[in-house]
Image (cartoon, rainbow, N blue to C red):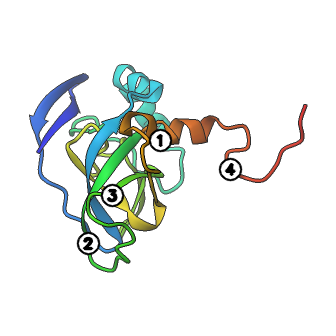
C-alpha cells in the first residue's frame, strides 16, 4: 500500500506492507488525516522527539534508522476484522479512534511507531473497543478533528472542572 513515510529526515511516498489485524484489531481505510503540529515538530526535531518518548512508561521510542508513518488525527472506513472482535460496526462504517493500538506487546501509539502505520498510510489498524462511529452526514475531514478537539477540550471528557 502507499504511504507518506518519514525516512532519513524527509517525508517520501513509498509502498509499505499491508497491515494484518490481530486479535481485537480492525483493518481500516484512511479517509482523512490531519497534519498535527506534533507531526511537524517530530519531522524537524525527530531526535529530540525520540529521546522524549523514552520517558513515557511502556512507550517504544522511534528508531530513526527505520521508517515511520505519522498520522494520529484520522477518520477511517472499516474494511475487515481480526480474530476475537465483536464486529460492532459494519464494513463501510466511518470511524475515529483513540490513536493507540493494543496488541500482544502492549499499547503502542499510532503515528509515532516504526511498527504501526498511522493515518498517512492508505490503510491502518485500530483497536475495536477504542473506536467510535462517525455520525451520519459529518464529513470525514471534520471527523478527523475528533482527536485534536478531544485533547484541547478543557474537560477532556473527564468530569467537570470549576469555572475560573
Looking at the image, which residue is at 21% across and 33% down? 5
Is 65 left, or right, of 1 in this rendering?
Answer: right
Quarter location, residue 43:
top left
Q: Position of residue 97 (x, y in %)?
A: 44, 52
Q: Position of residue 18 (x, y in %)?
A: 14, 54
Q: Does the CB distance between marks 1 and 3 fall below 8 Å?
A: no
Residue under label 1, please give it.
53
Q: Residues within 10 Å of mark 2 (few under 14, many from 20)?
A: some
Residue under label 3, please give it.
93
State which tag comes first along the sequence, 2 or 3. 2
**Secondary structure under the numbered disc 1 in the rendered image:** helix
Alpha-carbon distance for marks 4 and 1?
Answer: 25 Å
In this view, the residue in front, 42 or 83, is 83
Quarter location, residue 127:
bottom left
**Secondary structure under the numbered disc 2 in the rendered image:** loop
Residue under label 2, please give it.
82
Alpha-carbon distance for marks 3 and 4?
Answer: 24 Å
Q: Does the CB distance between marks 2 and 3 fall below 8 Å?
A: no
Amino acid at each position: 500500500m502507499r504511504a507518506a513515510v518519514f525516512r532519513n529526515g524527509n517525508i517520501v511516498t513509498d509502498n509499505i506492507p499491508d497491515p494484518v489485524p490481530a486479535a481485537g484489531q480492525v483493518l481500516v481505510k484512511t479517509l482523512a488525516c490531519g497534519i498535527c503540529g506534533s507531526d511537524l515538530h517530530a519531522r524537524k526535531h525527530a531526535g529530540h522527539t525520540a529521546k522524549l518518548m523514552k520517558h513515557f512508561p511502556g512507550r517504544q521510542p522511534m528508531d530513526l534508522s527505520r521508517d515511520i508513518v505519522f498520522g494520529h488525527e484520522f477518520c477511517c472506513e472499516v474494511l475487515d476484522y481480526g480474530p476475537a472482535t465483536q464486529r460492532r460496526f459494519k464494513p463501510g462504517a466511518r470511524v475515529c479512534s483513540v490513536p493507540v493500538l493494543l496488541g500482544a506487546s502492549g499499547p503502542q501509539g499510532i503515528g509515532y511507531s516504526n511498527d504501526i502505520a498511522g493515518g498517512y498510510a492508505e490503510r491502518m489498524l485500530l483497536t475495536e473497543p477504542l473506536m467510535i462511529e462517525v455520525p451520519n452526514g459529518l464529513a470525514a475531514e471534520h471527523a478527523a478533528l475528533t482527536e485534536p478537539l478531544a485533547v484541547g477540550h478543557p474537560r477532556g471528557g473527564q468530569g467537570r472542572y470549576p469555572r475560573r
